[in-house]
Image (spheres, grey):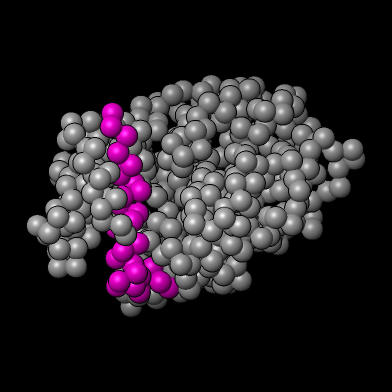
Amino acid sequence: MNKNVILEVLMKCNRCGLCQEVCPTYRVSGNEFAVARGRNRLIRMAIEGQLEFDKEPEIEQFINECLLCKACETNCPSGVPTPELISQVREYYTSTKGLPIAKKIMYRGVFSHNKRIDLVRRLAKVYQKTGIKTLVRMTGVNNIFNKADDMLPDLPKNSVRGQLPMLLKNIHQPKYKVAYFLGCSVNNFFSSIGVATIKVLQKNSCQIIVPDVNCCGAPHNSAGDQREFKRLAIKNLKELAKLDPDAIIVDCSTCGSILKEYVGLFENEPEYQKLAKQIAEKVKDISSFLIEIGFKKEMGEIKARVTYHDPCHGVRFLNVQEAPREILKSIPGIELIEMNEADMCCGGAGSYSIFYPKLSRQILSRKINNFKKTGASILATSCPACTMQLSFGMKLHELTSPVKHPVELLAEAYDNKAK
């Protein structure tokens, strides 16, 4: 953490307060230190010696409670990159104190290893379907992760990778050769999204390769664990470098934005940065790619009112906003209704909902209340973390409305045409 560089950036903040209008944590708490202006002030006071990073636990608390949604940065007239500053301070804390044990178990112990994620999914599936869940709750073990089991979706029997031999086809005279970056959340928790992505791409004459990638590193990056983030990034870059696709397709906004962030991660390592730039240029959000190639419009009908939630990594990192809506509007029978604050964070932010449940649920309630006002029967989004959070919100509000990825609805429309 270069304190002089950070201080120079912080001096650009003119304390106008426009960040208050868009900051989810401030909107639900009203706390000045829960908004960019307040957080930046804390960082500045620590750098200038008025406070100490290591002796003021409140600083670490407010730094870690930031969602990194980037809403403040896009609304800042001075362009202060508060999320980047927050990330650097988190990296300092992690490098000096290490990861908290719960995050170390979850991130390094599980998400860094594909086989372990798969094992956890299998065990969690058994957990959901048996009386073990009741026993665990009686012992209070689930309190370690703030009852995260409540947030889990109904887990699929098979991961997407487990279904690949049945899903992947040799396309006769394909128009495109694409690599599908299958993220760990879609692969293990929301396999229906991955299945739909493959079916839709094949329907649109794409020959698909599914490389053996690891987690993109988003959880590690968010927690300031740059060492592990870099290790995962190098493995993924080397794996993707073996291929020569027309595009690298992502159906997870977080994975897509992180793959593009590899460029900055290796700014002092020219060899990897060159590779990261080559990869970043080919990364395409599934909806944007389909619009770009002119996807097939021959579909059956889906009678539904749908509204769309913009994932933070989609709208503010990948600049994807219109493409998912165009996909939805193209489906016969779907009426797309805009939701108030559609681009405000849902409070999921990966594992944020586990470690900061109170703030997360307050932000989530605001989102679900906005959904209810639309009168829509389906809530669509393009991020599995958002899908998990929003589905949990439906449960909390006793709603039965499903949360769907636009590509799931498109796949369903294609299937309806075939019937």
Side of 224 where 242 appears, left or right: right
Which of the two residues, 223 or 332, is positioned nearer the viewer here? 223
Place of residue 238 in the rendered image (x, y in percent of width and height, measured from the top left):
66, 60
Residue 50 visible in image: yes
Nearer to me, 32 or 87? 87
Query: Is residue 204 left or right of 372 when viewed as pictured?
Result: right
Q: Which residues are magenta?
A: 77-105
Q: Quadrant of residue 88?
A: bottom left
Identify the image quadrant of residue 362: top left
208 lies left or right of 62: right
103 falls in the magenta region: yes
- Front-lying residue, 406 or 264: 264
Can I make out residue 408 in this image? no
Judging depth in this view, the residue of 133 and 197 nearest the camera is 197
Could you say where residue 318 lies in the image, as x and y percent from the top left?
51, 38
Whether the magenta-drawn stretch holds residue 345 is answered as no
Q: Could you tell me which quadrant the N terminus lies in?
A: bottom left
Q: Position of residue 304 (x, y in %)?
A: 55, 27
* Residue in view at x 61 percent, y 28 percent: 327
Instruction: Name the residue: 58% across, 35% down.
Output: 406
Total labels: the figure holds 0
Query: Residue at horizontal 23%, vertical 60%?
Result: 60
Snapshot quadrant of residue 79: top left
**Please, which residue is most extreme toward the bottom here?**
139
Residue lying at the far left of the rendered structure: 50
Residue in the picture at 27% in, 43% down: 9
Percent position of residue 391, x then y? 44, 46
Which quadrant is home to the C terminus?
top right
Q: Report the residue that reaches farthest toward the right.
A: 172
In the displayed structure, would residue 358 be above or below residue 340?
below
Would residue 209 be found to the left or right of residue 383 on screen? right
Magenta: predominant secondary structure element?
A: helix
